[in-house]
Image (tube, rainbow, N blue to C red):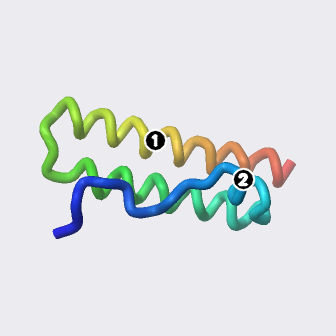
Amino acid sequence: MKDATMVPEFDVGGFINLSREQRIAKCREMATEAERLAAGKSSEVRASYLDLAQKWSELADEMESISDA
C-alpha cells in the first residue's frame, strides 16, 4: 500500500512551462491522486481530499473551456 503522501509532484514553475494539454492532464492527475488518498480515511480527512480533488478537476475543466472558447 502506498503511503499517505501525494505522489505527483507539483512545481509551479514547471507547470507554467507545460503545454495547455499537459497542464490539463497534470490537474487531472492531481485530482485522481487526491481521490486515491481519500479512500479509507476518516470522514473529515476524506472530505478534505475529495474537496481538493474537486478543485483540481474544476481547474482542468476551466482551462479546457477557456482554451476552447
* Residue, far right: 69
Q: How many residues crowd mark 1 within 10 Å: few (<14), some (14–19), many (20+)?
A: some
Residue in the image at 37% along x and 51% along y:
34
Secondary structure found at label 1: helix
Residue in the image at 69% along x and 56% along y:
15
Q: Is residue 37 left or right of residue 18?
A: left
* Residue, far bottom: 1
Secondary structure found at label 2: helix
Residue 66 in the image: x percent, y percent? 80, 45
Mark 2 and 1 residues: CB-CB less than 8 Å, in contact? no
Residue in the image at 31% along x and 54% along y:
5
Marks 2 and 1: which is nearer the front?
A: 2
The N terminus - image quarter = bottom left
Residue 44 in the image: x percent, y percent? 20, 30
Instruction: Give the mark nearer the N terminus: 2 vs 1.
Output: 2
Amino acid of disc 2? Gly
Amino acid of disc 1? Gln
Residue 65 in the image: x percent, y percent? 75, 47
The circle drawn on residue 62 is none
- The answer to whether 31 is drawn above or below residue 55 in the figure is below
Occupied quadrant, residue 48: top left
Q: Is residue 53 left or right of residue 37?
A: right
Number of callouts: 2
Q: How many residues crowd mark 2 within 10 Å: few (<14), some (14–19), many (20+)?
A: few
Q: Which residue in the structure is indicated by mark 2?
A: 13
Residue 53 in the image: x percent, y percent? 43, 45
Q: Which residue in the structure is indicated by mark 1?
A: 54
Q: Is residue 28 left or right of residue 60?
A: left
Q: Give the Cα distance between marks 2 and 1.
A: 23 Å
